[in-house]
Image (cartoon, rainbow, N blue to C red):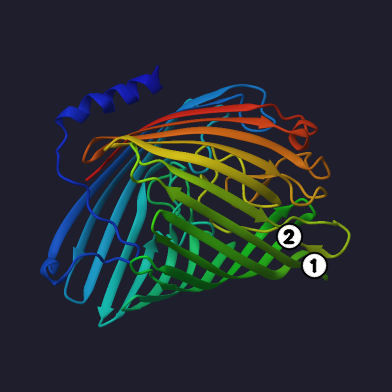
């Protein structure tokens, strides 16, 4: 009943909401031009979500139905050279089996709080901030969970013409249940340099980056230890005519220290692609797309190497909003069709066929960091099939309704570990101003 009441209250408020358009977002704040200097702006955001897993994710034997609520309020000041942003968040959960997860619930806390400086083409930010780069395969603000991912640290950026270069030194924020008690996780570190050449009309864009990552007590099928990993990657993306493409490759190296004087050499990689063709001259402008992803797995637990790819801080809903599968030890092929039956509506249907890359390794699931599905190391190749339907409708300029349906039909790799098919359903009402 709580789930229905939350959504009914939100829906009933929609007709009386302001019709002002939501603020534009930018990947590298502060936004706005010189005319905004000295202005103090406020933004608000709300998300109400009712969701159900039947049964719960892999290995769970009972259904799980619960509700999530997110409320964010932001104050943003921009001067001629300096800027500042404070964003407070309140996150609630009701009805989850076993209680709220670590990204579900929090008392009032700071989601973001940073100071910014600008000098010509140079920008710098210090404090708590969200990140989103490229396709969000490795670095994202993780919007799917109730509490988005933020980092504490510093970031410097230089923009010139179509080129942007960022450098950052950060730690992810660890959610705690109390008010204003979130802290940077001392067991995780992230540094990196990320360069982007934006595409022009009918042109190709390019991302090139190097990332450093450290995590204490990392868990993989081959063992547990302190993980130190470097990633070098490149992404090619663009659009020409009716075609669009997005291809990314990453190579990783480092070590997993499993004990005093003992370690595994990290050697991992991924190759991911998303190619689409849009029939703009047809009704509903259908886009046919194909995603193909290959993320390396560990071939032999006794060879002294760790070959499981780690996507660091990915967008958990990359494969679907159900967020059941993580991009590690994975081969998947996902054809999909997206169309627009109304100017304010978008619908996507898709099928995702999933295999292990290496049979000896496990199946991995979310949330990040990687989570091993118990009992799946050494099981069969075939993980299963996921069928999805996603619909988005703009009720008003600042209100949005989303419906997500997914059914994961487990294959032998999961069935041999005792997992059953899972059906996921979610209804989300969002407001942003």
Q: Nearer the viewer, residue 253 or 345?
A: 345
Q: Which of pointers 2 and 1 lies earlier in the amino acid sequence?
A: 2
Q: Nearer the viewer, residue 104 or 407?
A: 407
Q: Which mark is residue 225?
A: 2
Q: Describe residue 35's horizontal placement relative to residue 227 as left or right.
A: left
Badge 2 vs badge 1, beta-carbon distance below 8 Å: yes
Mark 1: secondary structure: strand
Most extreme residue toward the bottom is 120
Dot 2, how many residues are within 10 Å of its Cα: few (below 14), some (14-19), or many (20+)? some
Determine the residue positioned at 60% across, 65% down.
249
Q: Which mark is residue 199?
A: none
Q: Describe residue 52's horizontal placement relative to residue 403 as left or right.
A: right
Number of dots carrying numbers: 2
Most extreme residue toward the right is 302
Residue 92 % position (x, y): 40, 35
Determine the residue positioned at 14% across, 38% down.
18
Q: Describe residue 160's horizontal placement relative to residue 35 as left or right.
A: right
Determine the residue positioned at 64% across, 51% down.
370
Q: Describe residue 339's horizontal placement relative to residue 337 as left or right.
A: left
Instruction: State the CA–CA distance, disc 2 to disc 1.
Output: 8 Å
Residue 248 % position (x, y): 56, 63
Residue 402 % position (x, y): 37, 33
Task: Give the position of the N terminus as an image quadrant.
Answer: top left
Dot 1, how many residues are within 10 Å of its Cα: few (below 14), some (14-19), or many (20+)? some
Determine the residue positioned at 63% across, 21% down.
62
Residue 139 can be seen in this image: no
Q: Which mark is residue 263?
A: 1
- Residue 302: which quarter of the image? bottom right
Residue 214 % position (x, y): 62, 66
């Amino acid at each position: 009943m709580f789930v229905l009441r939350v959504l009914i209250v939100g829906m009933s408020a929609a007709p009386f909401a302001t019709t002002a358009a939501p603020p534009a977002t930018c990947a590298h704040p502060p936004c706005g031009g010189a005319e905004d200097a000295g202005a103090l702006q406020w933004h608000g955001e709300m998300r109400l979500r009712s969701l159900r897993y039947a049964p719960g994710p892999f290995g769970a034997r009972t259904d799980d139905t619960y509700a999530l609520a997110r409320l964010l309020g932001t104050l943003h000041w921009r001067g001629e050279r300096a800027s500042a942003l404070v964003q407070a968040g309140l996150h609630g959960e009701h009805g989850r089996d076993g209680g709220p997860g670590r990204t579900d619930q929090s008392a009032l806390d700071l989601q973001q709080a940073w100071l910014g400086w600008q000098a010509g083409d140079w920008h710098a930010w210090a404090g708590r901030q969200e990140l989103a780069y490229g396709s969000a395969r490795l670095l994202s603000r993780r919007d799917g969970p109730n509490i988005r991912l933020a980092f504490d640290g510093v970031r410097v950026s230089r923009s010139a013409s179509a080129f942007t270069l960022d450098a950052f030194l950060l730690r992810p924020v660890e959610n705690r249940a109390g008010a204003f008690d979130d802290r940077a996780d001392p067991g995780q570190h992230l540094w990196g340099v990320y360069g982007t050449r934006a595409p022009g009309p009918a042109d190709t864009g390019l991302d090139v980056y190097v990332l450093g990552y450290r995590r204490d007590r990392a868990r993989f099928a081959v063992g547990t230890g302190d993980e130190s990993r470097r990633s070098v990657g490149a992404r090619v993306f663009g659009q020409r005519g009716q075609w669009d493409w997005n291809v990314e490759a990453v190579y990783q190296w480092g070590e997993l220290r499993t004990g005093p004087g003992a370690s595994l050499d990290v050697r991992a990689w991924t190759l991911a692609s998303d190619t689409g063709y849009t029939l703009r001259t047809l009704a509903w402008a259908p886009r046919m797309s194909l995603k193909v992803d290959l993320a390396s797995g560990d071939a032999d637990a006794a060879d002294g190497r760790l070959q499981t790819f780690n996507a660091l801080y990915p967008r958990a809903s990359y494969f679907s909003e159900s967020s059941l599968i993580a991009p590690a030890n994975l081969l998947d092929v996902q054809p999909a069709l997206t169309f627009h039956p109304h100017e304010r509506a978008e619908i996507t249907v898709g099928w995702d066929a999933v295999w292990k890359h290496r049979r000896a390794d496990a199946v991995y699931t979310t949330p990040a960091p990687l989570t091993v599905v118990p009992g799946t190391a050494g099981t069969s190749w075939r993980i299963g099939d996921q069928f999805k339907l996603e619909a988005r409708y703009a009720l008003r300029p600042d209100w949005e309704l989303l419906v997500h349906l997914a059914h994961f039909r487990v294959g032998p790799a999961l069935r041999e570990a005792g997992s059953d098919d899972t059906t996921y359903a979610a209804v989300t009402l969002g407001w942003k101003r």
